Image (cartoon, rainbow, N blue to C red):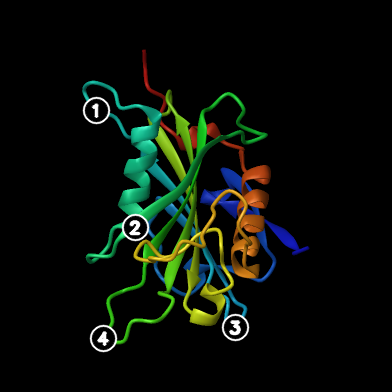
Amino acid sequence: MSEFKDAQLFGGAITARVPVDFRDASDFREVPDHQEVYVSMTDGVEISIIFDIAQRVEAPAGPSDAEAVDFHFEDVAVDQGRTAKIWSKNVVYLPNLLDHPSYQVIGTVSARPTDVPTIPPTFTAILMTIVRLEKQTTDIVITINVPFNDPSVVATEKCIASPVYQGNDINPANGHKSELLAFGMEVTAEVVESFRIINWGLFVIEEE
């Protein structure tokens, strides 16, 4: 089982637990004010965690939560012509935010185009949790990116695959998880379990 540490997000207004070897990306590169990014410092493990405070997805007719979830996934996943696929979408409950609807998506994005495609095709897994804060007109989007860059690792994964994969041996419900996906899901579970808003003044309250 992995070790985790407390992370102070957005000046301590939010806290969550992240793996001990993950480092705040703002220590060495620019990160937008509405995001906090933690990256693995372990060689060969390129996993990252992005905490994003986003404008609540709304429309004149009022989109369903499912439509909002799809919007956030597509916003993160669709890039430079790459294809994406959602493998599962579920309601989840954050222990410290039980009064707020939350959703979890597991999807994949195909690898960037290359002249030498791999077999099986490589991809990035996107493990996304969306917390809908209606009065704060905010969607909190927590994204764990898990790159599957090694075809030999891809071959061990039977729960998810590249959106362009044509095989029939993938079973999202009970297929065999590779060690890489299992670790990504462990990180997701710890982040969601520990996620806590300390200072609600971080958000603007929608007046009725």
Residue 136 spot, x, y in % from top left: 42, 28
Residue in the image at 71% along x and 59% along y: 5
Q: Nearer the viewer, mark 1 or mark 2?
A: 2
- Disc ID at residue 115: 4
Residue 123 spot, x, y in % from top left: 42, 69
Asked whether residue 109 is in view, the answer is yes
* Residue behind mark 2: 84
Residue in the image at 41% along x and 65% along y: 162
User: In this rendering, is residue 111 above or below 107?
Assistant: below
In the image, 192: left or right of 141?
Answer: right
Q: Amino acid at mark 1?
A: Ala
Q: Residues within 10 Å of mark 2 (few under 14, many from 20)?
A: many
Label located before the other in sequence (2 or 4): 2
Quadrant where the N terminus sits is bottom right
Under circle 4, the secondary element is loop
User: Hey, which quadrant is residue 193 in on the image?
Assistant: top right
Residue 104 spot, x, y in % from top left: 51, 42
